[in-house]
Amino acid sequence: GAVVSQHPSWVICKSGTSVKIECRSLDFQATTMFWYRQFPKQSLMLMATSNEGSKATYEQGVEKDKFLINHASLTLSTLTVTSAHPEDSSFYICSARTGAGYQETQYFGPGTRLLVL
Amino acid sequence: GQSLEQPSEVTAVEGAIVQINCTYQTSGFYGLSWYQQHDGGAPTFLSYNALDGLEETGRFSSFLSRSDSYGYLLLQELQMKDSASYFCAVRAMDSSYKLIFGSGTRLLVRP
């Protein structure tokens, strides 16, 4: 089956630093990747939709200058949390889309847990 | 907008059958999906209903009724490892392909 990886799986950083998270589709090309954030005991909240070669589309309330998304190739998207603060501590999950129409499926990465001190 | 409601928690005993409901309000969608998520892990895909009716995959079945804006996930022969959170999700019918997740149901399976 399709595999999506994320790196790093865990990151602890000081407040004010920037953190980059990578999302890779290992055995398929993903035209679209999605970035989610999940706080403890809550649902997944979509942050942005990332399309290869174009600017990401951010959901309402998500600061595009704080959460920089780059989708330079069909197998790699990166999320950079700039000037991280403790309230950015969360579980960040990416997914990659494959297929089309009713056969379209999203595969999720294992997630990255971010702790900002 | 789109919203999906699920019960927050369900408890059942090992070997039993449990049904997790999902009611939604959406202007249109391609289908209803179900995902399982264990604590600390990422969501894993369980099932997908593009059309009304029942889809069966081993111990798990999923049902969709578009006329009732309702679906459910049925788990049979519950095992301890089924303790997890379960999310229903719809895929937007626009060109974004984004998934909108329900609030999630925490299932606790007791011995």
Image (cartoon, coloured by chain):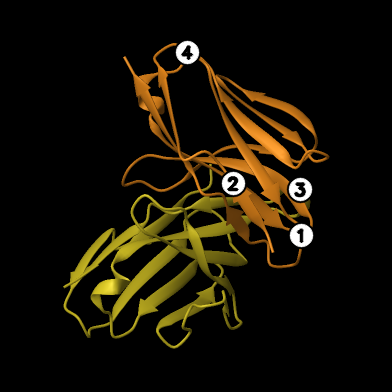
Chain colours: A yellow, B orange
Q: Are marks 1 and 3 in contact (CB under 8 Å)?
A: no
Q: Are marks 4 and 3 in contact (CB under 8 Å)?
A: no
Amino acid at pointer 3: Tyr
Query: At numbered mark 2, what does the secondary structure look like: helix, strand or loop?
Result: strand
Amino acid at pointer 2: Glu
User: Which residue is disc 1 drawn over?
Assistant: B93
Amino acid at pointer 1: Met
Query: At numbered mark 3, what does the secondary structure look like: helix, strand or loop?
Result: helix
Q: CA distance from mark 2 to mark 1?
A: 19 Å
Residue placed most toward the observer, A55 or B93: B93
Q: Decide: is A41 above or below B17.
A: below
User: Which residue is disc 4 drawn over?
Assistant: B16
Are labels 1 and 3 assigned to the same chain?
no
User: Which residue is disc 2 drawn over?
Assistant: B5
Mark 3 residue crowding within 10 angstroms, few (<14) / some (14–19) / many (20+) = few
In the image, taking residue A109 as reference, residue A100 lies left or right, namely: right
Of callouts 1 and 4, the N-terminal one: 4
Q: CA distance from mark 1 to mark 4?
A: 36 Å
Foreground label between 1 and 4? 4
User: Which residue is disc 3 drawn over?
Assistant: A102
